[in-house]
């Protein structure tokens, strides 16, 4: 089945976006939050994650017909804006959207519209953090499912619907023993990562509108708990409160490395030592 031409796939990553709410850092006063957010060590760390985990997984997609918007604030220093825009040459799917401070919904609505082609009546919008990865067939499968849901009438202009892949790998970078870093888990509720929402470009809803844990109480959700579809990283620099779920299953390092290569387009030989050094430097 050929892809529907009326459904565009767009992702948004809030890349150190200094907005109104949404992160722990932003609960401080604006100037203090900006100082923390744009500190050189922190920004170098965020770029290390973005350039070596998030972007490579998206570059490995079997379906390259998508856009990723890096949403940044107009307070971001020029040196970091320049580095981000330089990445657009390496990754044609990447676009940078600079906005003033706003709430999570208003800012992300504008970010999705920034990448909109101006003609498709539907957007299937996904979200991703700069330190996470999605499987190499994530776009292909999200498109196939969203197209089918639209064809069936399960989603339409008045009815948004979410697509949620629940199984992934938790990677605890803070643990020194490589054999204790990787965990296999299938989420019991939708996770923001590897989730997308079918909406219209003018609609008020998108995947950022509700806390992901409450998503199933707000919109129709199509759920798949089977295949590895995301890598979620844990480290001492997470802004959100991440932890290994209590009933996650340990994943041997050799299996995790194989999944990194085969499912996520990542190079564990290069990536794991790099992240270990980064964690050591930041301790």
Image (cartoon, rainbow, N blue to C red):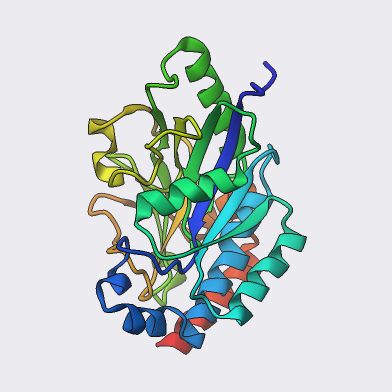
One can see residue 171 in this view: yes
Q: Is residue 20 left or right of residue 54?
A: left
One can see residue 229 in this view: no
Nearest the eye: 175 or 155: 155
Task: Look at the picture and state if 209 lies above or below 16.
Answer: above
**Residue shown at 29% from the left, 37% from the top:** 215
**Residue shown at 57% from the left, 42% from the top:** 10
Q: Is residue 233 left or right of residue 118?
A: left
Nearest the eye: 71 or 136: 71
* Residue 74 point in image, percent of width and height: 51, 70
* Residue 230 point in image, percent of width and height: 48, 48
* Residue 55 point in image, percent of width and height: 62, 58
Q: Quadrant of the N terminus?
A: top right
Q: Residue furthest top?
A: 152
Task: Look at the picture and state if 197 lies above or below 54.
Answer: above
Q: Is residue 38 left or right of residue 260?
A: left
The number of numbered discs placed on residues in the rendered structure image is 0
**Residue shown at 53% from the left, 17% from the top:** 148
* Residue 33 point in image, percent of width and height: 34, 79
Q: Is residue 269 left or right of residue 124?
A: right
Q: Residue furthest right?
A: 89
Nearest the eye: 54 or 177: 54
Nearest the eye: 45 or 231: 45
Task: Look at the picture and state if 17 lies above or below 281.
Answer: above
Q: Quadrant of residue 156?
A: top left
Q: Quadrant of the C terminus?
A: bottom left
Task: Look at the picture and state if 23 lies above or below 3.
Answer: below
Q: Quadrant of residue 179?
A: bottom left
């Amino acid at each position: 089945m050929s892809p529907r031409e009326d459904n565009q796939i767009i992702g948004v990553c809030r890349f150190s976006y200094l907005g109104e709410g949404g992160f722990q850092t932003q609960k401080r006063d604006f100037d203090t939050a900006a100082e923390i957010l744009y500190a050189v060590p922190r920004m170098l760390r965020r770029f290390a994650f973005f350039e070596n985990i998030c972007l490579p997984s998206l570059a490995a997609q079997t379906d390259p017909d998508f856009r990723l918007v890096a949403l940044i604030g107009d307070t971001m220093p020029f040196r970091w804006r320049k580095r981000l825009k330089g990445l657009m040459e390496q990754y044609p799917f990447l676009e940078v959207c600079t906005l003033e401070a706003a709430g999570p919904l208003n800012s992300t609505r504008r970010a999705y519209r920034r990448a909109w082609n101006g003609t498709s009546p539907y957007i299937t919008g996904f979200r991703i953090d700069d330190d996470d990865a999605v499987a190499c067939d994530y776009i292909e499968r999200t498109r196939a499912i969203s197209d089918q849901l639209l064809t069936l009438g399960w989603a339409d202009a008045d009815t948004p619907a979410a697509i949620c892949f629940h199984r992934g790998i938790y990677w605890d970078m803070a643990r020194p023993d490589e054999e204790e870093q990787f965990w296999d888990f299938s989420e019991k509720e939708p996770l923001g990562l590897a989730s997308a929402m079918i909406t219209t470009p003018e609609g008020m809803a998108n995947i950022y509108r509700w806390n992901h844990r409450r998503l199933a109480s707000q919109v129709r959700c199509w759920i798949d708990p089977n295949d590895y579809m995301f890598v979620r990283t844990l480290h001492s620099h997470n802004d959100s409160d991440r932890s290994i779920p209590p009933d996650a299953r340990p994943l041997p390092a050799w299996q995790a490395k194989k999944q990194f290569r085969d499912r996520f387009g990542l190079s564990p030989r290069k990536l794991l030592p790099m992240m270990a050094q980064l964690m050591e430097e930041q301790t």
